[in-house]
Image (tube, rainbow, N blue to C red):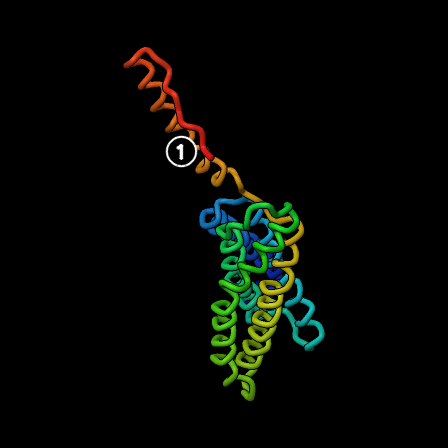
Amino acid sequence: MLDYELYVVFIEETLISVGLSLIAVFLVVLLVTGSVHVTLLVLLAVCLVDVFLVGAIHYWDLTFNTVIVVNIVIAIGLAVDYSAHIAATYLFIVPPKGFSDSEKRVYKAKKALAVMGSSVFHGGFSTFLAIIALADSQSYVFVVFFRMWFIIIVFGMANGFILLPVILSYVGPLSDEAQESSDEKPASKANKDEEIEFESTGKPTERPLKA
């Protein structure tokens, strides 16, 4: 009777758990990156991992049960690790001056992969080594865990290394405001010093011409 009652609310509880997990991912990534644009792209990569996971469940002849649902929810927390680090690094890369907007995006995406790619790969590969011992297990729970985590690692890293950088190279945000404001600070300070000197002497300050 208890098993029957479980399957009555099965889909509803699954959707609630996945939805709350995605909300938590959105808030945490937004807090870390400070960019709604990048946060939505990371959330897209995470959602696609769950979509691929549901497809793999069908082709591996698995059925929805509590073990599968637990792995679907866990997948959200694992997949965000492969995309969030690269996306956050993208924001901190400063492109060279003179590049067009498209060239800046491509440069920032390539540099983010070069800087953070090895660390993300090592994290995914070490996770794979941790679960490979379950590959030859005869227990249903262990077999499901191995298959689910294998799909999470493969598609999570694929989204982080291929899909997300490609999207960022086309529609990634460019924040040049901080750099422009830092360039304007020396000029504004010089103007302020000039105003103070004018008020004290009553004469305009003659500044030497630069060669």
126 w.r.t. 205: above or below: below
Question: Looking at the image, which residue is at 60% across and 70% down?
Answer: 65
How many numbered circles are shown? Answer: 1
As drawn, which residue projects farthest toward the front? 211
Task: Give x and y (percent) for residue 40.
Answer: 59, 49
50 vs 2, nearest the viewer? 50
**Rendered image quadrant of residue 146:** bottom right
**Rendered image quadrant of residue 57:** bottom right
Task: Give x and y (percent) for residue 119.
Answer: 47, 68
Q: Is 168 left or right of 34, judged from the image as shown?
A: right
Q: Which residue is mark 1?
A: 186
Q: Amino acid at mark 1?
A: Pro
96 w.r.t. 125: above or below: above
As drawn, which residue projects farthest toward the top? 202
Q: Is 136 left or right of 31, judged from the image as shown?
A: right
Task: Give x and y (percent) for residue 126.
Answer: 47, 76
Q: Label 1 neighbourhood size at 10 Å, few (<14), some (14-19), many (20+)?
A: few
128 vs 145, nearest the viewer? 128
Which image quadrant: the N terminus?
bottom right
Question: Looking at the image, which residue is at 56% across and 46% down?
Answer: 97
**Rendered image quadrant of residue 58:** bottom right
| Element at label 1 | helix
